[in-house]
Image (cartoon, rainbow, N blue to C red):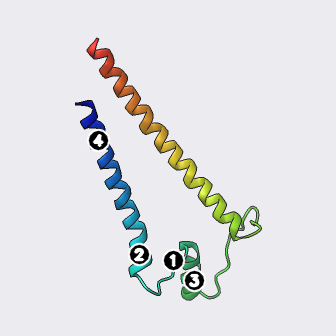
């Protein structure tokens, strides 16, 4: 019984990974000529279209040296967020398993 459950979970996880890969690759393969730019640039372009005389009322606290640093910070933010989500899910699963073991005693 326990082996069947592990096989079933493995199959579900494998299916989820395949779905994620398809979702990630689909736009790259089938949407030709599309620009995958950031929303910050689009917002700035739209503001300039609407009001060409617009002057920003706030400035950056510091200017990053390049786009690579910006990409690195974004990747670190995503990794940290994924770590927090995975920790919470693992904690909740462990807590549930502990309760089930205590109930079976």
**Residue 49 location, quadrant:** bottom right
Q: Give the residue at x 64% y 65%.
A: 71
Which mark lies nearer to you, 4 or 2?
Answer: 4
Query: Residue 41 placed where, x, y %?
Result: 58, 77
Q: Is residue 22 left or right of residue 70?
A: left
The answer to whether mark 1 and mark 2 are in CB contact below 8 A is: yes
Q: Which of the 4 quarters of the picture holds residue 4? A: top left
Mark 4: secondary structure: helix
SS for dot 1: loop
Q: Residue at x 49, y 38 (%)?
A: 87
The quadrant of the rendering that contains the N terminus is top left
Q: Which one is earlier in the sequence, the residue at label 4 or at label 1?
A: 4
- The earlier-in-sequence mark between 3 and 1 is 1
The residue pinned by badge 4 equals 7
Q: Residue furthest front?
A: 3
- The residue to which callout 1 is attached is 36
Crowd rating for badge 3 (residues with CA inside 10 Å; few <14, some 14–19, many 20+):
few
- Contact? badges 3 and 4 (CB < 8 Å): no
Residue underneath mark 3: 45
82, 39: nearer the viewer: 82
């Amino acid at each position: 019984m326990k082996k069947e459950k592990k096989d079933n979970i493995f199959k579900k996880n494998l299916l989820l990974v395949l779905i994620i890969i398809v979702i990630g690759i689909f736009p790259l393969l089938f949407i030709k000529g599309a620009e995958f730019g950031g929303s910050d640039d689009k917002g700035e372009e739209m503001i300039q279209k609407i009001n060409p005389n617009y002057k920003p009322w706030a400035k950056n606290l510091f200017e990053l040296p390049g786009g690579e640093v910006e990409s690195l910070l974004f990747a670190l933010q995503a990794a940290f967020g994924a770590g927090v989500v995975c920790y919470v899910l693992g904690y909740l699963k462990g807590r549930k398993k502990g309760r089930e073991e205590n109930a079976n005693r």
